[in-house]
Amino acid sequence: MQRSKQRYPGFLILAAGQGRRFGGNKLTAMLDNKPVIQHCLDTLTTLDHPVAIVYEHDNTELSRCISAYRIHKIPFDAAHLGMGASLAYGIEQTKDWNGWVICLGDMPWILLSTYQNIANKLHNHVIVRPTTPTISPPQISGHPVGFQQRFKQELLALTGDKGAKCIISRHKDMLYSMETSDYGIVLDIDRPSDLNRPP
């Protein structure tokens, strides 16, 4: 008997950013012969979890890049209000999910195993954030970050461009730091030169 995906957290991709430092639409820029956003989608859609993406409603180029994927597409007409607003809208549109792993569309080098491990850890921990080992403390925290369903109301209340950091700050005692050797969790694309660096 196949288990319902609703028992598990879903992966919510934030892809509505303005890309000001990049000087254009970084998610549709080419990286290793395909758009940046497709690296994220190709990884996540192999997992047995629901996947949704929040994107700017009039971004036709991005719409074309994601059109072939069988995921929950969430166009957002107020992306200019910031990441917090986009995240809250995505939570509202996926409020039946049993938890969320919040992913950033401009982080194409995260390993499949990292995504899966974060989702797995949400069974026993209410907030899961990956960290990379360093030569000396402190460790470096990265993305994506997982939240159990109990944080729905706090996620829905987000505004502006702060994202979910404020929720983590309020509940530090509940945070589980998942150590990983996957340095993709701290590598994002901000500028065109980032497309040329090795993962």
Image (cartoon, rainbow, N blue to C red):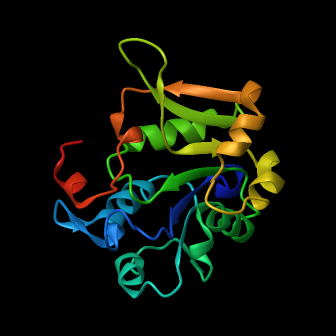
Question: Residue 197 at what x, y percent from top left?
Answer: 18, 46
Residue at the spot 53% in from the left edge and 62% down from the top edge: 14
Question: Residue 192 at what x, y percent from top left?
Answer: 23, 61
* Residue 147 visible in the displayed image: no
Task: Report which quarter residue 54 is drawn in.
Answer: bottom right
Task: Report which quarter residue 10 is drawn in.
Answer: bottom right
Residue at the spot 60% in from the left edge and 83% down from the top edge: 77
Q: Is 114 placed above or below 106 here?
A: above
Task: Quarter of the image for the C terminus: give it.
Answer: top left
* Residue 162 visible in the displayed image: yes
Residue at the spot 82% in from the left edge and 46% down from the top edge: 150
Question: Residue 132 at what x, y percent from top left?
Answer: 42, 26
Q: Is 94 placed above or below 178 here?
A: below
Residue furthest to the top: 136
Q: Is 143 placed above or below 157 here?
A: above
Q: Is residue 130 left or right of residue 34?
A: right
Near-viewer residue (161 or 94): 161
Question: Residue 4 at what x, y percent from top left?
Answer: 67, 56
Q: Is 100 placed above or below 156 here?
A: above
Residue at the spot 32% in from the left edge and 59% down from the top edge: 39
